[in-house]
Image (cartoon, rainbow, N blue to C red):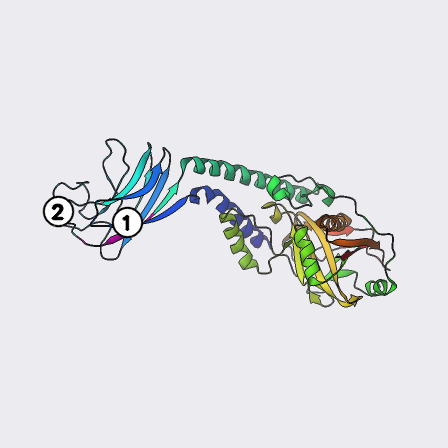
Amino acid sequence: MNRCLLILLIGLLLPSLVTAQSAGQDSTFTVSTSQAWTDTGLDLKTGDVLQISATGTTCNPQGVSGSSQANLPLSSAPAGALIARLHSQGAEPILIGTSHELHIDEPGHLSLGVNVSGTPPCQGDFSVKVHLVSAQAGSQNAAYSAQDVKQKLASAAQIWLAGQFGNATSSSSATNTTGNSATSGNTTSTTEALKISNTPLDATLRKDIDGMPRRVNDEFNNQGDMVNFVLVGSQQQVQAALDAANWHLADTDTKEAALKAVLDTYQKKDYLAMPMSKLMLFGRYQDYGYEMAEPIAMVASRHHFRIWKAPFTYNGQTVWVGAGTHDIGFEKDQRNGKVTHKIDPAVDCERENIGSSLQKSGKVKSMTYYLPPNPVQDARNATGGGYRSDGRLLVVFLQ
């Protein structure tokens, strides 16, 4: 588990730091050896950086070795080589060859050409790729990336330390439950009071809920998180409601997740779908896992839940049974001594967070609490972490 977290954290951080280096304008030009100069149309400013690479099918951009011509534009370079001109006053051409990086010291205009005088030593074309990193954009991106990564790292570190030393606050004061903290950097909760219906649950649904397991278990049959909410609605309704509530479907493959983390961050996206462990209810692993967290801090802290399709329906509608907890750091797994996530022991806060987010989505018809027989009120999960609850389930009817 700790290796997975480390890989994901590296994947999240490193691309963010190099994004500014990679951002820029890409252009491709065809340069004929029979034409003295080809205008690229690129105007250059002081501080710009040009990364130029070239290939040729019949001619070598490095020029023709041993070929000599008088009055070459660039006497120090072989005849037929790819060269560049910046149109700066008094500036001589620059050898490009197969690749070269130019740092612009004063404003100019880029033209590409061939180092020839008279008949070229080779007849053909060069395919030239130019990557232009603007001085202004580069500095802005670098400043933004450094600031952004610094803030995210600080947030992740604070969450991790709080979880390690037992000073973490409950879910009601943790990551923004709207999911918008990813862009605002605000970690203040906006959980609102739930609008609970006073209508009692139908007797048939109560009976089915009473017959459900109270807790999930791992593959070794160790009991774990408590079942603390129920959704009533089709798969399409559930997915639509969770999407509208800013919950992210968790990845299921750890190796693919690490690659996605790298690619998403490289493309200036935030990776918000870290895999979660598989737990069992009704004798099988979860159908779906969903999570909500701040980028990078997700490694240490996230709101998350698993849901299973129940073996019964209600009035012809699908029933989904869920177990939600809030990760607040890391602790030792009592089963094997490895590192695992530490959950907020006040699990009812995560139940309220799930209900509040769904309520804000506008996809809820009604919701109510239900206290089943033999409620779970004080227990430990499969990894040994303790938690407490009032034992009630939140039953949500979707529209």
The residue where tag 2 is placed is: 68
Q: Please tell me whether mark 1 sits on a helix, a strand or a loop.
A: loop
Magenta span: chief secondary structure: strand
Position of residue 224 measured from the top left corner of the image (x, y, whole percent): 73, 58
| Residue 378 seen in this snapshot | no
Q: CA distance from mark 2 to mark 1?
A: 20 Å
The crowd level at tag 1 (other Cα within 10 Å; few <14, some 14-19, many 20+) is some
Q: Please tell me whether mark 2 sits on a helix, a strand or a loop.
A: loop
What amino acid type should be assigned to the residue bearing mark 2?
Ser
Position of residue 159 measured from the top left corner of the image (x, y, whole percent): 65, 42
Residue 114 left/right relative to 251 = left
Residue drawn at (35%, 44%), measured in percent from left and top?
51
The residue where tag 1 is placed is: 98
Depth order, front residue of 78/198: 198
Image quadrant assignment for residue 175:
top right
* Residue stretch in magenta: 122-129
Position of residue 221 measured from the top left corner of the image (x, y, whole percent): 72, 65
Quick check: marks 2 and 1 in contact, CB under 8 Å? no
Residue 76 left/right relative to 312 = left
Residue drawn at (58%, 38%), measured in percent from left and top?
151
The crowd level at tag 2 (other Cα within 10 Å; few <14, some 14-19, many 20+) is some
